[in-house]
Amino acid sequence: MIRHIRRAAVLCLLLLAALLINAARLQIIEARSLDENPANRRTSIARYDAPRGDILAGGRRITGSRDTGQQLRHERTYTEGPLYAPVTGFSSQTYGTTLVENAEDLALSGAAPLLAAIPLWHDLSRSRPPGGDVVTTIKPSMQRAAYAGLGGKRGAVAALEPSTGRILALVSSPSYDPGVLSGTGRAAKTAWARLNAAPAQPMLNRAIRGTYPPGSTFKIVTAAAALDAGVVADVNAPTGTPDPYVLPGTRTRLPNASKGCGNASLAYAIQWSCNTVMANLGVRTGLAGMREAVSRFGFNDRDLRIPSEVVPSNFDTRMTVDQLALSSIGQFNTTATPLQMAMVSAAVAQGGELRTPYLVERVATSGGRTIAQTHQRTYQQAMNPSTAQQLRRLMVRVVERGTGANAAIPGARVGGKTGTAQHGPGNSGTPYAWFISWAQADDAPQPAVAVAVVVEDAEAVRGHISGNGSAAPIARAVMAAALRDAEAGR
């Protein structure tokens, strides 16, 4: 009898050990796969059980959370949602996350290990700390100026602080309210379908994911390449460019919108935007020289993050000579995001040094303790300091006595470059209006801001589209806001 009891006891111990081993296997070995299983709702329930951390701009929370009382308890809310949508993106219980909501999701959702006061505590306890906060570099006054300037027209604005790389404004228009996508009900699904079907593509972040032919604003890049390569030694000397200029290897004549471009200097060509001169200088610089120069500004970079992914701006690495001529004036296959062209302007403003752009200043716990900080760094030396100094003077001349007069600001030194980019089959589409610029208060030691504006207003009369008329006033409003903030010490 005792022998049978002992055998039963051993069997029970073995069964208990098996249960413990299986529990350990589920809790340790298979925990991740079970958490990630789509059929497991516990992860989603835990994710939305507490309020999400917030995104801040100018020290103010531009997101929040609403207690629904449902199983997925807390939904995301947005303050001035359309204004900040190109920054925040959305956080949806149905459709996931985008932009900063996605890039900083670990911190915002409370899943980042650094949020724990004791290392690994929340991993062991299988709990989450309160969501962390993400502090952005956005200046609300500049964001509002850009948004109001676009006025619902299709287009985008990107503004940078040249000395640091901070993104001060990031606007895409038309925009949308990300709050309509937060929940799981019919309203969210209807909004999703409506937004995705809209011809104006309001959920496309045109500032970092829309690419456009940059047109004449790209001439600043070509000028930098020609000066650095020694193709141009004196910006005021004639370049020997005929008008009309026939594209090499073809019979195609390249037109100019301005007069006096025959044998014009680089200075005149920038001031009055001569296509012939800049195309010729691009050809003389050569494909290898142009390719090297554009890479220093950030073109063809597939790894740029701000921390959201930025669509690469394109400059072809293999071209015929006539294609190189067109690419050198921002046409053919050359395309750029507004952020990319703001980087071009910032490099000129910063003496040739291009700082890496970034949108998130720091990440903090709900109690305010900083757990991550973005460190400023140099992206590239985009051009020689002497080249940048010359281009600064030429961009100032564009505003003071050239094609960019609408960007002038009393009491400030403003440099700019206009652009009107053709597109569509046979250039049949309404041209895109571009303006890139930088501004420095007369009593300031360095420029406060660099801006790029693109307007793709399909409703406008074709002949009325111009960088100076459509885009420069928007850039001026954004720069003026930046100068006011700098003067007030904000």
Image: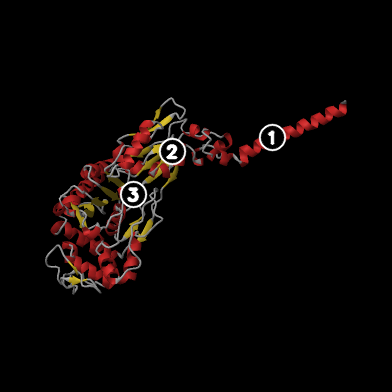
Quadrant in which the N terminus appears:
top right
Counting other residues with Cα less than 10 Å from the Cα at mark 1, is it few (<14), some (14-19), or many (20 or more)? few
Q: Can residue 266 be seen at all in this image of the molecule?
A: no
Residue under the image location 56 percent in, 36 percent down = 121
Of mark 3 and mark 2, the one earlier in the sequence is 2
Question: Does 280 appear above or below 487?
Answer: below
Judged from the image, the secondary structure of the residue bearing numbered disc 3 is loop
Q: Position of residue 342 (x, y in %)?
A: 28, 54
Q: Is mark 1 in CB contact (under 8 Å) with mark 3?
A: no
Q: Amino acid at mark 1?
A: Leu
Question: Does 445 appear above or below 296?
Answer: above
Residue, disc 3: 166
Of mark 1 and mark 3, the one earlier in the sequence is 1
- Give left or right: position of 28 versus 262: right
Of mark 2 and mark 1, the one earlier in the sequence is 1
Judged from the image, the secondary structure of the residue bearing numbered disc 1 is helix
Judged from the image, the secondary structure of the residue bearing numbered disc 2 is helix
The mark found on residue 108 in the picture is 2
Residue at mark 3 to residue at mark 2: CA–CA distance: 21 Å
Residue, disc 1: 20
Quadrant in which the C terminus appears:
top left
Residue under the image location 15 percent in, 50 percent down = 461
Answer with the quarter of the image where residue 259 lies.
bottom left
Q: Position of residue 325 (x, y in %)?
A: 26, 68
Residue under the image location 87 percent in, 29 percent down = 3
Q: Can residue 44 be seen at all in this image of the molecule?
A: yes
Q: Is mark 3 in CB contact (under 8 Å) with mark 2?
A: no
Which label lies toward us, 3 or 2?
2
